[in-house]
Amino acid sequence: MSNNILFAFIDESGQPYQLDEGPYVLAAATVAPYNLVRVEGNIRSYLTRWSHRLGRDIPEIHAREIIQGESPPPRTLQQNPRRINWRRVDPRIRQEVIDRFSELIASQPILLNIVVVEKRPGVRIHSQYGVRTRALTYLIERVLMSGRTPRILLLSIDSAALRQDTQLQIEVLNALSRVRVKHQARVFISFEDSENSPIIQIADVVAYIIRNVRMHRYTIGRINIENAFLNIERRIRRCPGTNRYERCGLKVWTITQ
């Protein structure tokens, strides 16, 4: 039965209403049940090693916080004074954290599926919900094509707030009704805190790196993300019988009108 189940962990970078600033990116890391504990354990071990090395608590990896050197919200630091403040960490260390994590991603038994939404200059977005629903449709189609079609598909999505999660659940259900890939999978949706669901952290890093690469931003502040991109690229799902991933594991949708 486990061979008929597929887990997909999803996160995003940017928002549909920010398309004038840059792409909106959805990323999914898919993993089979028999590899789930192994991959989660590898991520947790990585966080533990860096926590010991830096003498601070690193409960999760958020690409933007590390690469841009951001501080956690004041309330978070009040709740846990030992939590790492990336603003105070040397850029060379932050570079190493991202590079090593991307190497970890490249070594895991996962597949990455990514949807990039861009628009031509001057095009107006009339419904951000419509944009995300269509992007989710493309992403779910690609997840369903990630191997043998599963009988059960479990979608774990990075949680925001209750109201946003409720809206996103509606969009996912609408996306599922539009999927063009023939399947009989039963789909279950959950919203998870990425601290408790480590593979969502992979989707977070992938979405952020891909978004910036699509903007031709290979250096952000003092952090270079080119090596991270090259490592992540190794796990993007290829088109059958080729080494090409464009239009298969990576779908670019350009809004032209």
Image: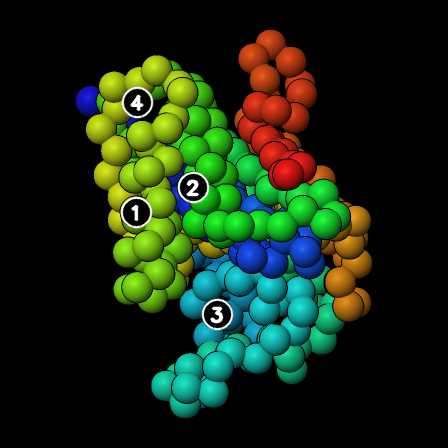
157 displayed left or right of 105: left
- Amino acid type shown at disc 1: Ile
The local secondary structure at tag 4 comes to: loop
Provide the residue designation for mark 2.
133
- Type of amino acid under label 4: Pro
Contact? badges 4 and 2 (CB < 8 Å): no
Secondary structure of residue under mark 3: loop
The one nearer the camera, 52 or 156, is 156
Q: Is residue 24 left or right of residue 48?
A: right
Check the picture and name the quadrant holding the N terminus: top left
Of mark 1 and mark 3, the one earlier in the sequence is: 3
Quarter holding residue 234: top right
- Quick one: label 4 or label 1, which is nearer the N terminus? 4
Residue at disc 2, secondary structure: helix
Question: What is the number of the mark on residue 150?
Answer: 4
Query: Which amino acid lies under the numbered mark 3 shown in the image of this protein?
Result: Ile
Q: Which residue is mark 1?
A: 170
Foreground: disc 4 or disc 2: 2
